[in-house]
Image (tube, rainbow, N blue to C red):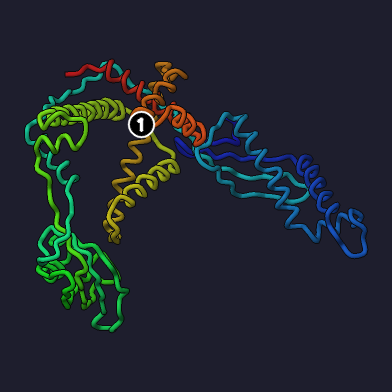
Amino acid sequence: MPENVKNSSGCKKEIHIEIPASEVMKEWERVVAQYASRAKIKGFRPGKAPKDMIKRMYYHDIRETLINNIVPPALNKKLTEEKIQPVGQPVISDLHVHENEPIRFDVAVETWPEIRLPEYTGIKVTKKDISVGEKEIQDSLEELQEKSAQYTPAEERGVKEGDYVVAEIKGKNTKTKRSLPTEKVVILAGHKDNEEMLNKNLIGLKQGEQNHFSIQYKKDHDNKKLAGQEITYDLKVESIKEKKLPEIDDDFAKELGNYNDLEDLKVKLKERILESKKDAQRRDMVEEIIGKISDQMAIELPESVVEQETNAILNRQLSSLPQQNLSKEALDSLKKDVRKRAAQNIRNHLILSKVADEEKLKVSEEEIQEEMKTIAKKHNVTLARVVESVNQEGQKEELKDNLLIRKTVDFLLKSAIIE
């Protein structure tokens, strides 16, 4: 490797680039001429002002334009010559730009590591036995029952645990006397996540009735605005709805869909649970195979890619959590765990991609079309709509990549020794 390209680590390269003074001056004169042709300077016709005057008046703009015109092409040319494919954005430093001199600068780039696979066929993996018990079927039935629950007004009685209550609540800080915004909220009476005093003062109230009570919040309360504060509340019940669960019988099964009776529903639920367990069994075996390959390899990953994957996972995870303020310790611990998962995801993808390359696995256009048909059927939409969405949103390469990974996983499973 030439002296002006150095490996600073497995994934990092440092490049020194020098653009000859002759090229720089040629571009410099061209940029100056452009500014001169557009400059409006008192006492001179357009394009007739002396170039030295133009340089003095617009020096910083001319220099910036010169850099933008000449540095990116020089960098791209060097990367192409050295067959370097950067991951992320190259970082330029120590930029030296002076008239009549070469332009010199350093570039730091990250690249994918070159990896060598150990033996990846004939790996021994354990296939766990799977079955579906009656309790699992009953749990699924009860879950469907909960989803089919109806909520009917309960106007003649007070609030009971499990009721959904629409209430108006007003709060005031007892120390500062500052009122909190009046809110209309929906409360699941008696829920364990509610404040104890809220549940205590809500149970028994009838529609139109109200209670006055105080809550002393702990100093480490999730809501920092309430932490350590005592708040008095006026709570008024506006409506009460009680949950009514349907009976789990033949009629219940028929209302859920195309089922003949309750027994038919149970059979279909068993099939779904079994299919889900088979998918989990397959994932476990794949993770074991890739884990055994990964354990024999030392792969240094590009820091920027790990950071990007970490942030993506973290954002998804935080958005799925209830609205709450995590403590710094909890957030740091979460980030640490997510970072490990992000690194493992990238490492696994690199291994699978390398196996696909070694085995010369490819995805045909016919396989892509079949996958889009499957997606259309699964989401009950037309094939034309799926094709349009994939093409418009530029997801075809992602779809192709996912199919290739799936094909590689199938290859590893078929070539494994399953015990």
Q: Which residue is mark 1?
A: 380
Q: Relative to 272, is 77 on the left or the right?
A: right
Q: Relative to 20, is 272 on the left or the right?
A: left
Q: Quadrant of residue 15?
A: top right
Using the rendered image of the protein, determine whether residue 155 is visible from the camera's viewpoint: yes
Q: Which residue appears at 22% of the width and 77% of the height?
A: 231
Residue 326, x across and y down, in percent: 28, 59
- Mark 1 lies on a secondary structure that is loop
Residue 158, x across and y down, in percent: 10, 67
Q: Which residue appears at 32% of the width and 18% of the height?
A: 411
Residue 329, x across and y down, in percent: 27, 58
Q: In front here: 369 or 354? A: 369
Q: In front here: 237 or 309? A: 237
Q: In front here: 189 or 245? A: 245
Q: Is residue 15 above or below residue 202?
A: above
Q: In front here: 92 or 68? A: 68
